Image: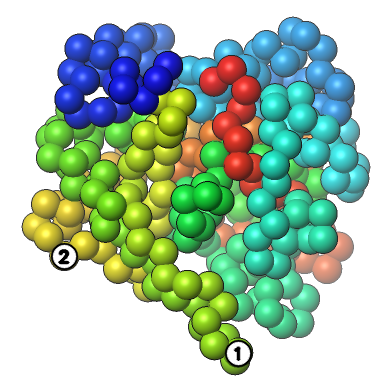
Amino acid sequence: MTSTRSPFHLDADAAYQAWREAKLSNYPRRAEDMVVEVGDPRALTPAEHDAILIRCRKTNLAIYASHCGATPGKDIPRMLGLQFGLKQLDHNLLADEDAITSLTVAAGGGQRGDFIPYTDRPIRWHTDGYYNPPERRILGLMLHCVTPAVSGGENTLLDHEIAYLLMRDASPEHIRALMAPDAMTIPARMDENGVARPAETGPVFSVLDSGQLHMRYTARTRSIEWNPSPATLAAVAFLEQLLASDLSYIFRARLESGMGLVCNNVLHDRSGFSDNETQRRLLYRARYYERMANT
């Protein structure tokens, strides 16, 4: 698919209608339908690989449930990713040296304790790396659960293509506004040395050279600046209403030990959670510059 033929361009209505019909046909409505039982995610069987790929082609996400238990090795997300063409890891701030991040509550606070992913607080709807520049767009994302929280820590997931579809059906002007190059600005992040990360302005929805759809979004109300135009604010309000609704396309799942998420950086959130002295939530997160191969 080339970008000039992409159904995600507003002037490609025939292509969009054909894509829309195929997208909605037999679209799953239960989180259970997204789960693939696997033996060892580091070495999938052809049937396991195909089952994950089929789900990702349809919904941009799949959940695997393995028999690895609380195996702490990071080779699980790394080797699983390679089987789907995910190779280029994002060395983001506070990631571990190997670029795979250990998501757990930061003991004693410190620098990590200043960032919500390293706390037990809820995280609002977002796509990963929404503050990254275009050359570091996060297209693929993996989460692997080593140890779940004692309670809470549920993820809510929505295919970003479904969000686009519902918004375009409601009003193409919503899409036009969120495709504007100045739709959303993430202000610069400052530290004691000055600018730690420059401001990043860009669209919410964009079309990749491959013709696939990319989305950068956060529901945060702080550290974000929306284009003040009425069209943009109306589009943002519509999207917020979608995400706050009981939309049947939204999946809710809690990753247990040995389970993981493989996706093309779909919209997701995380509920708050509780640990105790003997059980601390630990997930590995891998962010990639590639989409999953063949999706």
Residue 143 visible from this viewpoint: no
Q: Which of labels 1 and 2 is toward the front? A: 1
| Crowding at mark 2 (Cα within 10 Å: few <14, some 14-19, many 20+) | few
| Label drawn at residue 228 | 2
The chosen color scheme is: rainbow
* Residue 92 picture quarter: bottom right
Q: Are marks 1 and 2 in contact (CB under 8 Å)?
A: no
Q: Is residue 97 above or below residue 9?
A: below
The amino acid on which the numbered mark 2 sits, given as a three-letter code, is: Pro
The amino acid on which the numbered mark 1 sits, given as a three-letter code, is: Asn
Q: Secondary structure at mark 1?
A: loop
* Residue 103 picture quarter: bottom right
Could you tell me which residue is drawn at 9 percent across and 57 percent down?
Answer: 230
User: Residue 108 versus residue 98: which sits nearer the camera?
Assistant: 98
Distance in Å between CA atoms under marks 1 and 2: 31 Å
Q: Is residue 132 above or below residue 66?
A: below
Q: Is residue 277 left or right of residue 220?
A: right
Give x and y (percent) for residue 243. Answer: 33, 45
Q: Is residue 36 left or right of residue 137?
A: right
Residue 200 visible from this viewpoint: yes
Give x and y (percent) for residue 126. Answer: 45, 52
Could you tell me which residue is drawn at 79 percent across and 49 percent down?
Answer: 147
Give x and y (percent) for residue 142. Answer: 66, 40
User: Residue 266 versus residue 99: which sits nearer the camera?
Assistant: 99
Query: Looking at this rendering, what residue extends furthest in the left direction?
Result: 230
Give x and y (percent) for residue 154. Answer: 57, 47
Q: Secondary structure at mark 2?
A: loop
* Residue 108 picture quarter: bottom right
| Crowding at mark 1 (Cα within 10 Å: few <14, some 14-19, many 20+) | few
Q: Which residue is mark 1?
A: 193
